[in-house]
Image (cartoon, rainbow, N blue to C red):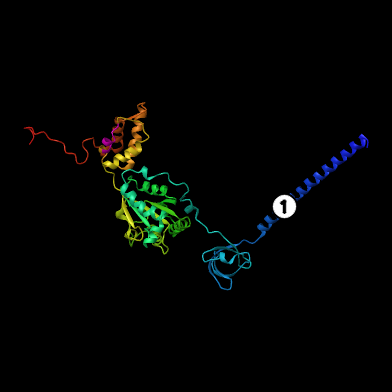
Amino acid sequence: MSEIDFGVRRKGDDYVKYLEMRVQELEAEVNYLRNEVNYYKREIEKLLSTPLIEGIVIEVLKDGRAVVKSTTGPNLIVNVSGSVKADALRPGTRVALNQRGSTIVEVLPSSEDPYVRGMEVIEKPKVRYSDIGGLEKQIQELREVVELPLKSPELFKELGIDPPKGVLLYGPPGCGKTLLAKAVAGETNAVFISLVASELAQKFVGEGARIVRELFNLAKKRAPAIILIDEIDAIAAKRMDLGTSGEREIHRTLTQLLAELDGFDPLDNVKVIATTNRLDVLDPALLRPGRFDRIIEVPLPDVSARKEIFAIHTKRMKLYKVSLDELARMTEGATGADIKAICTEAGYSAIRAGRKRVTMEDFVYAVKKVLGGRYRPYGQEEGFKPRVSKSPSVV
């Protein structure tokens, strides 16, 4: 074979390979376009199809049919499509009904109110027991009531007792009630759901009670879980016979909360922590055993507790000749929140003076500014009795 014939043959083979590759590309493009056409056909069918009706299964009959509460109003006895598994149908299940034959064609996922879902705290609070000063007794009680049943439920089963359901923390503002609840959630592996009680006061009739019901349903699904209801006195004041429509709606919300706490199902893995500054205004029905089994007082810190709180808030500060004992004695009546504000204000005082260390003078200035009229100079704290000189001029 001559070189010319060999070159022609080689070019012919290359051209054949090119055509084969081109055919494959065109086939792939045809398949892609065919899929596109099928997709748009399905979309057109969806747009032209009759909408489905939502319903709630009331009862599953022995013959395979089901009694469904339709959102359009009446109760219906309907057939079940072969594509729906029989064991998936239970009372309370949300289903989709075909309008033409009123047949259950699909099981819908359970719905959760976005407002309630938004209460769940995905990230655990970073507060730990070591961040709380002067409340050792309260921490111990919380660990027994909340943490121990969640971590070691077998202890209660072995003893044959039911663990407590709820804890109520009460005391003056700023003494660490909310901080204690966050520390419990931070120390356990439970889901933390936090809300302020005023969020349950809704303007529409029955809305607050519905939110309470869905809140506890969410907690049961996500168990183990801790529900924190802050400032519970906003919805749990003593009920009276007379009142406005708004007060009656708040009473409905409270009634639903009592029912959820009392509940038919034991809340073994759901613990409720509530806080309040006004124990005296709470409804007695809320305080009885079986709802809030433990009522824990969070009082104003004493001298030793104030020293511990000062130590916690100053552990990262650069101090110069600062006596925590003197600070604890001169802040009689201060809360934990006051002490945190004093430490922050002392730091600002050092910054204004152009210093990189905080001195005792900065703290004295901060105490006077934060406590105001409550400030007592060192040596004049509660219980201090000044000496009186026995001179002839003194009777």
Q: Is residue 326 left or right of residue 233?
A: left
- In percent of the image, x 29 and y 47: which residue is there? 299
Residue 7, x across and y down, in percent = 89, 36
Q: Residue furthest bottom?
A: 63
Q: Residue furthest top?
A: 354
Q: Secondary structure at mark 1?
A: helix
- Is 325 included in the stretch rendered in magenta? yes
User: Where does the magenta region start and end?
Assistant: 322-328
Is residue 362 something that shows in the picture?
Answer: yes
Q: Is residue 251 left or right of residue 371?
A: right
Is residue 251 something that shows in the picture?
Answer: no
Taking 203 as reference, is 6 above or below it?
Answer: above
Residue 106, x across and y down, in percent = 60, 62
- In percent of the image, x 48 and y 50: which residue is there? 118
Instruction: Name the quadrant of the C terminus.
Output: top left
Q: Residue furthest left?
A: 392
Residue assigned mark 1: 35
